[in-house]
Image: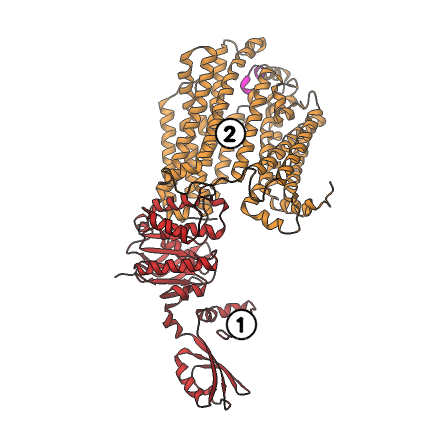
Amino acid sequence: MSLAHPDLAGTGALVRFALRRDRLRLPLWVALGAGLVASQSVSSQTLYDSPVALAAYRASVGSNAATIAFAGPPVGLDTVAGAVAFEISASVMLAAALMAMFTTGRHTRADEEAGRTELVRSARVGRHAPLVAAVVVSSLACVATALAIGLVATATGLPVLGSFLLGASVGACGLVFTGIAAVAAQVSESTRSTYGLVGALFGVAFVLRAAGDINGSRLSWASPVGWAQAVHPFSDNRWFPLLLCLVATGALVAVAMTLLDHRDLGSGLLPARPGPPTAGWLLSSPLGLAVRLQRGALIAWTVSLALLGAVYGGVGEAVETLFADNPQAQIFFPGTSSAGLVDAYLATIFAFEALLAAAFAVSSVLRARAEEASGRAEPVLATATSRSAWLGGHVTVALLGSALLIAASGACTALVRAVATGEGSAFGRLFAASLAYVPAVWVLAGVTVALFGLVPRAAAGLAWGMVAYVLVVTMLARGLDWPAWVDDLSPISWTPLAPIESWTASAAAGLGAVAVGLLAVGFGAFLHRDLSTG
Amino acid sequence: MNAAVSVAGLVKTFGATRALDGLDLEVATGEVHGFLGPNGSGKSTTIRVLLGLLRADSGTVRLLDGDPWRDAVALHRRLAYVPGDVTLWPGISGGETIDLLGRLHGGLDPARRADLLERFDLDPRKKARSYSKGNRQKVALVAALASDAELLILDEPTSGLDPLMEAVFQENIREVRAQGRTVLLSSHILAEAEALCDRVSIIRHGRTVQSGSLSELRHLTRTSIAAETARPVTGLESLPGVHDPAVRDGRVRFDVDTDHLDDALRHLAGFGVRSLRSAPPTLEELFLRHYGDELAEDGVPLAAPGRP
């Protein structure tokens, strides 16, 4: 198919226009990927500067299912370069997938939803052009990320071939998620649900490869993230998984184009169903409206986190096996029981699940900002609804919803562990441990409310920056050699590492007080400022 | 009875922009008040201040004998609002939205709701995502009109409606007025204001430039006269209030200030009038007079206002 095909007319102009619109975003995404790799490369080479240190690292990682669950297959750990790839590839691949999702979604469904595609398509622009242009732009960004990673890895002293293969594997992961986002943008009718669908698929892909990598099974090959990681840069240096990613991307884009041919502009694949002619009982208060607006997201998050909790709970068994199979690890952890190691693993899992719940809490609070910015808050606040009741509705959903998510994932992890070990008492102990993270999550929600009140226009950027910061600190701080205050800024760090450390009332009360203070600041500022649209 | 809305010297700035610059507005209880001005003149900003969504920098603002910022919730029970740019929740149906806004307001009359849906020809089952701009506007209008609010604040409520629906809207506003309720209607469509409003305020650059009943304002306007006379008309130039007279081949054309119309016609009668055409003054003309200098600055040629 040449660019002269009428369905593709205007693709070149749209690509240039999209690059113009994204002239700031895309370089930032590429810099994020390259920066993560560079920082990891430098710190790993400092940390594992001797063969002994590297051997110790290999032993501890080889027996730590939690690390494998988050990072990838433990291969190539006999070199520092291999250790870099192992530690950072999952994070960079997540970043590449998000970049692909946002770039593709922004130039397809988001434009279509806003009515911009209609305007563009009324010009001499072919039916496939907007989709193909979005795919091209996202693919260019993936290639740029791949090259940038190859360059910084080489520049920081890692082998050239492996460096560029590491970059290529990250880019390939981004390409597959470009294809997945292209399909999702055809299936769902709104941008929000497009991102939800892609995010859920990334979650499934990540869990599949986590389960496969821990058990050393073929399950990893069911996941595009698994394919990308099967490149094994710096050790096996395999090319064929990259080919697999390319083929999958091509197939997904072809599917997206076929779907595009079979639907109307502005609609999804499923015809829009009529709604009820009158409102139910829920839509009679600001809280009811907030619940109704966030119901779909809350259900999707709850189901995802419950499944994730069950999967990670099931992996607990492999932690024991890994430990038993690894005599070296038993030397490096003298006196550690396998049960203690499982608890350490579960503490990491609970912290991770709490972070996901915090991401929900932040997006939920920011829903209030989206309502304000779009002008939808205005008619509601022009009724006999006070500002505090209106904001309170969204904040209530954020606080109770995030607690529900933590409880759902914690309960599933605890239940699976209790069944696996045959100890009924394990359920209560582990469920309670997971709940220890609720106050920390509420602090993050509180910060978002305060930002919403004080700096509404910058709130979304700052709040998501905070989530990224806490995520990086929680997951990587121990691996990267950062000063202590970096760690201390994250409320997750103030929470006892339940279940290894025991829950303390003082920590919970302290975090709770901070959360209440932040909420008070946010509400106070919102009650005294102008409503700001746009 | 006190005024429904009373604004004096209202100032509101956004950064360096002075959106409202000493605005005055007086809406009497029971009247339909037209709030006129071109885009960006500060109409929506004024309304947002009246709703307590924005805080006034200075000036006094009274709404239904209350402070719109401090008493927002109590006042909102007594008013209904239709925003200029209606955005709705894409996944929620029109009927649900009407009920939600009605309930949050403090209740709405189901019979009136059904009647309005019928008159505005609105399908309440459709999700807001699939509504056109006009239909979104109808959702907000039905929610406002089905309430028992004593004050309706409508910000350019008909900009997306077709002529048929605009007629339905005007009919509804007349009914609201007959019930003794007050309406503040912002618009830049002058025909609409002329059809509905008892009094109008014209604003520009965040200041009120004219305010009064339509007949009062017409005193400020000019009537266009075109006539054929038996003898060539002379001496028009010396008459007070006559502008741009042009006499040619027994025809005469001129504009005259409405206050001096009588004198001009008496003068004309002396020359044996064979035919006479007069174009009544319109708000359009008043508008153009107030904004004419702006248009001229932008290089837009000015047609003589009011001339057919």
Q: Secondary structure at mark 2?
A: helix
| Image coords of residue A454 (percent x, y) | 42, 43
| Image coords of residue A286 (percent x, y) | 37, 41
Relative to B69, is A321 on the left or the right? Answer: right
Q: Is residue B154 above or below residue B223?
A: above
For disc 2, the marked residue is: A471
**Chain label for disc 1:** B
| Image coords of residue A357 (percent x, y) | 46, 29
Label 2–label 1 contact, CB within 8 A: no
**Toward the viewer: B306 or A44?**
B306
**Which residue shows up at 61% across the image and 26% down it?**
A225
**Toward the viewer: A434 or B117?**
B117
Q: What is the chief secondary structure element of the magenta stretch?
A: helix
**Amino acid type, callout 1:** Leu
Using the image, tell me which numbered label, if any, was put on residue A409: none
For disc 1, the marked residue is: B302
**Toward the viewer: A56 or B163?**
B163
Q: Colour of chain A?
A: orange
Q: Is residue A21 magenta?
A: no
Q: Colour of chain B?
A: red
Residue A455 visible in the shown view: no
**Comparing marks 2 and 1, which lies closer to the viewer?**
1
Residue B198 visible in the shown view: yes
Question: Marks 2/1: CA distance?
Answer: 63 Å
Q: Which residues are magenta?
A: A60-67
